Image: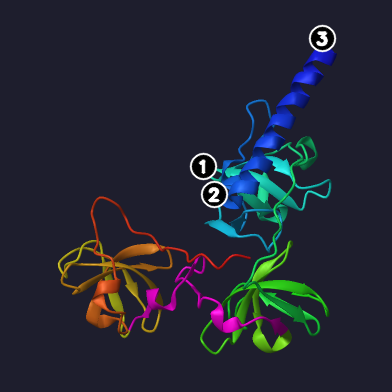
Amino acid sequence: MIRLFGIIWFMKRLLLLLTSMTAFVIVPAVWAQTSTPAPDMITINAVVYQTTNLREGPDTRYAILGRLAQDDSVQVFERESASSRWLHVMTETGATGWIPSFTVTLEDGRSLEELPIFEAAFPDPTADGVITAEVYGRVNVRSGPAIQYEIVGTLDVGDQVTVTARSNTMNDWLLIETALIEGWVAYFTVQVIGDPNTLPVLVPDSAGELLVSPSQILRARFNVRLHDAPSADAPTIVVIPFNSRVTLLARTVDGIWLYVDFDGVIGWGAADLFSTPPDLETIPVYSPEGTPEPSAEVTPDG
């Protein structure tokens, strides 16, 4: 009976391996997104500890499939090797991909050693246009693109990193990733390999939780009352202090009122009380059918 069970398990794993390899040969992106846990596989519930990219494979050079936010729930069902530095996960929406193991907290009493090691061949992560960098010396990695942001880790001389975004068109700060850390480093502390001008320009939103286009960030020109409806007569939710950053979410049809996020508090403010927003045509019109939220920009593949 035990021998029969072993044969059945092996055949299931072989079928999964062949299916994954076939999909990879035809369309690599489909290979990554359709590799879901088999019904008999062990899964561990986990919660995302910090914002992280969901990738096609277990390396920062693989394409980004999406982005997970802090407190998102995932199911972990495989690890890339005995070292368990990368985990194969399925999100609440059914998407699958790889994330660094340090970015999640497992449910109590569970261990990564319970999970099987991924057995299929990985696609080649090498891709044209990937921007990398080598560290000149010991460098602080920060949670945001400025020295006032907290230090989330350090890099040593000679470390190789993947660069996924920049803070402005002057490339003052670069968003970097390794298998163990993600954050911002000053441009002058690394030697960039590739053209950084091809990277997207991203900045933290008003709450510091997501990365968005600078066009989504406005500043209060005065102390601004944030209302729960686009009207000066509507109740005030909070007063936004002068020069505070807000994340632009939507607008009224006429553009007189803006729907913004101030440090996690969402409401309406008069448009002329904020720094000049982008063209009206680029701002979505508010729809009562769904509450707009800050939309994280996806960095280029790699």
Side of 164 where 267 appears, left or right: left
User: How many neighbours does mark 2 have within 10 angstroms: few (below 14), some (14-19), or many (20 or more)?
Assistant: some
Where on the picture, by quarter, is residue 6?
Answer: top right
Q: Which residue is mark 3?
A: 1
| Amino acid type of the residue tagged 3 in the rendering | Met
Q: Does 216 appear in magenta?
A: yes
The earlier-in-sequence mark between 3 and 1 is 3
The earlier-in-sequence mark between 2 and 1 is 2
Which circle, 2 or 1, is nearer the viewer? 1
Q: CA distance from mark 3 to mark 1?
A: 36 Å
User: How many neighbours does mark 3 have within 10 angstroms: few (below 14), some (14-19), or many (20 or more)?
Assistant: few
Instruction: Give x and y (percent) for residue 272.
Output: 23, 82
Q: Which residue is mark 1?
A: 92
Instruction: Give x and y (percent) for residue 212.
Output: 46, 70
Side of 170 where 286 appears, left or right: left
Q: Can residue 152 be seen in the rendering of this structure?
A: no
Residue at 47% in and 68% down: 207
Instruction: Give x and y (percent) for residue 209.
Output: 52, 65
Residue at 81% in and 84% down: 137
* Magenta span of residues: 191-220
Q: Can residue 202 be seen in the rendering of this structure?
A: yes
Furthest toward the top, the residue is 1
Q: Nearer the viewer, residue 273 or 236?
A: 273
Q: Nearer the viewer, residue 280 or 153?
A: 280
| Amino acid type of the residue tagged 2 in the rendering | Asp
Q: CA distance from mark 3 to mark 2?
A: 41 Å
Q: Secondary structure at mark 3?
A: loop
Badge number at residue 72: 2
The earlier-in-sequence mark between 3 and 2 is 3
Contact check, label 2 and label 1, Cβ < 8 Å? yes
